[in-house]
Amino acid sequence: MPLVPNLTLNNGLTIPQLGFGVFQVPQDQTQRVVEDALEAGYRHIDTAAAYGNEAAVGAALAASGVPREEIFVTTKLRNGEHGTAAKAFEASRKALGVDVIDLYLIHWPVPSQGLFVAAWQAMEKIYAADAARAIGVSNFLQDHLDHLLAETTVVPAVNQVELHPTFQQAPLCAQSRELGITVEAYSPLGQGTDLSAAAVTALAQNRGATPAQIVLGWHLGMGNVAIPKSTHPQRMSENLAAAQVALTQDELDAVSALDSGARIGTDPAKAAHTQM
Ligand code: A2P
């Protein structure tokens, strides 16, 4: 089974640097897909209440036979539940069938709603009660982080953002790291679109690796946690094997040169209550 490196979060908790994401995996396929991912060797599963597939993830965790403590489980607070985070957390815990969630994230800041500080304060209590091993945020831009840190106590363990070679958000990543916040990349393959970039395919050919392994090797070399998804077991294994692809600085630079600033997903400054 491929060895995936761990990163240490700002509270000492370790997180496998390559995880498996289930965004957009249909509910009726999620259990099978997560069981396949666990079988392939993933030990870090990333879901969200808003994906509607927490129960299927939970069913896969239970059916897999892998001891619970060997799997790092992340889920996220819905936008419409910032004011009722404690209740939402209980619902996620129940759906997943777990006592403790390894990492609980605010899914989007929804600045127009003005409730992320209240949500965070509720999450600080969940963390203090040891019901979540770490708490963090997702889709937070620089001003959202500044606002949160000015008003609360616990520094988020991670900021999970859209991040891939053609959309790197370097200033946001630098700010997060300076604050001790681990950067986690969602859509790490650019939802598949970055795999055909010429620099990626050229490196893949030189290395005898696949384009996905080059892109994921780049994430690992940049110090990101990455959560690629695939519904195909062979690709799950291929992606996990990227942990064995150590890119040189020149190779990292060649991939970093692909940044175009073009976001695929929603802009967090505008994402609203109704979107998730
Ligand atoms: P599929 O599920 O059919 O394998 P991201 O993780 O950036 O959101 O990208 C996910 C997309 O990339 C999905 O469309 C997935 O398709 C595709 N994908 C995942 N792994 C690979 C791979 N190793 N090679 C090609 N496409 C991949």
Image (spheres, rainbow, N blue to C red):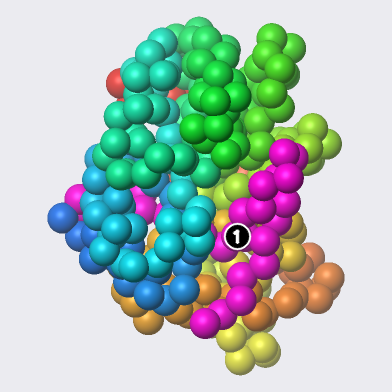
Q: Please provide percent x and percent y for residue 241.
A: 55, 79
Secondary structure mostly seen in the magenta stretch: loop
Q: Is residue 101 above or below residue 242?
A: above
Which residue does the image show at 74% across and 40% down from the upper left? 10
- Is residue 244 at least partly visible in the picture? yes
Q: Which residue is mark 1?
A: 16
Q: Is residue 201 magenta?
A: no
The foreground one among 269 and 262 is 269
Which quadrant of the view contains residue 199?
bottom right
The foreground one among 58 and 261 is 58
Which residue does the image show at 66% across and 53% down from the upper left? 14
Q: Is residue 66 left or right of residue 189?
A: left
Q: Please provide percent x and percent y for residue 33.
A: 29, 65
The foreground one among 52 and 126 is 126
Q: Is residue 162 above or below residue 128?
A: below
Which quadrant of the view contains residue 35?
bottom left
Which residue does the image show at 57% across and 39% down from the upper left? 133
Q: Amino acid at mark 1?
A: Pro
Quadrant of the image containing the C terminus: top left
Q: Is residue 4 magenta?
A: yes
Q: Please provide percent x and percent y for residue 83.
A: 41, 10
Residue stretch rendered in magenta on the structure:
1-27
- Is residue 273 at least partly visible in the picture? no
Which residue does the image show at 52% across and 35% down from the upper left? 132
Q: Is residue 36 left or right of residue 161?
A: left
Callout 1: CB less than 8 Å from ligand 1: no
